[in-house]
Image (cartoon, rainbow, N blue to C red):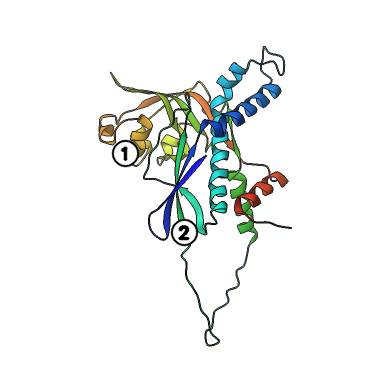
Amino acid sequence: MKVTRKDLDKLNAVLTLTIEPADYQEKTEKELKDIRRKANIPGFRKGMVPISLVKKMYGKSVLADVINKTLGEGIYDYIRNQKLNILGEPLPNEDVKREFDWDNPTDFVFDFDIALAPEFDARLTEKDTLTYHEIEITDKMVDDQVTSYAERFGHSEDVEQYTDGDFIRGTLTEQAEGGIVVDKAMLMPSYMKDEKQRKLFEGAKKGDVVTFNPSVAYDNDAEVASMLQIEKDKVAEHKGEFALTINSISHHQAAALDAELFAKVFASTGRCYT
């Protein structure tokens, strides 16, 4: 993995991480072989499912899961190795838009914003006084942090029916004469601002066709343009309804609260607890 850092000023920087095939191919193949060994698919004995079928059914979701894990490890390894003192968590950069070809994967490039802690030299004397603040750590704060870690180190898996927060891939067809067709559309209905449009996806299953209006669902043209894979200034020409044929549904499963999770957490923060 290649990581480059661009300092915007003394307090802000952008990390660009390039995940190459060598970083994910072996891990992806290993995960797919493990799925093949455990899969129970009608018409095949356990462990004898053709690997080509396993890749067709689970390849993209496994790849996405591996990329996500590799990305997380790469970010925190870089921060730890470079001994960067950052404020908060790295956040995806919203200024750079990148598209990935999940059917023909090569390099995956991601950009993250980081906030650098300011450097200062505090010299105190006996005349200086400081206010000591006692911070009460509530059970809710602890529970929320544990939940956050479980989500961060979770994994994605293909499911048959949509639930809130799932990621949908499919074919998007404009319901107008000569309308556009997006073969590899990707969307998360939970991000839709319009509640009625979100509810159209409740209980949807693989193979279902859901008709909705992207321009009503989202509150800005940039999101619609990204989904329809068109230029932002062309959105006004496609304000009608679209039919989405659901090809796959990816569900993010939080990690189990066990020793393995906390070993990853402590490794990512660079802390050691004994």
* Residue 39 placement, left or right of 203: right
- Secondary structure at badge 1 equals helix
Residue nearest the viewer, comparing 41 with 219: 41
Is residue 147 shown above or below 199? below
Q: Nearer the viewer, residue 228 or 197?
A: 228
Q: Quadrant of residue 272?
A: bottom right
Examine the rendering and report whether any part of residue 65 can be seen. Answer: no
Residue projecting furthest to the bottom = 127
Seen as rendered, the residue at the extreme top is 43
- Count of marks, rendered view: 2
Instruction: Say if residue 62 shows up in the picture.
Output: yes
Q: Is residue 179 above or below residue 109?
A: above
How busy is the neighbourhood of tag 1: few (under 14 within 10 Å), some, or many (20 plus)?
some
Along the polypeptide, which appears first: circle 1 or circle 2?
2
Cα separation, mark 1 vs mark 2, equals 32 Å
> The C terminus is located in which quarter?
bottom right
Q: Is 93 situated left or right of 35 in this image? A: left
Name which residue type carries label 2.
Answer: Leu
Q: Nearer the viewer, mark 1 or mark 2?
A: 2
Label 2 sits on a secondary structure element that is strand
- At 47% from the left and 29% from the top, the residue drawn is 106
- State the residue at coordinates (63%, 62%): 138
What residue is rendered at 56% in x and 39% in y?
Answer: 70
Return the mark for residue 116: 2
Q: Residue at x 55, y 87 (%)?
A: 126
Q: x, y percentage for residue 34?
A: 68, 26
- Crowding near pointer 2: few (<14 within 10 Å), some, many (20+)? some
Foreground residue among 53 and 198: 53
The residue identified by callout 1 is: 221
Type of the residue with mark 1: Asp
Residue 173, image x, y percentages: 37, 22
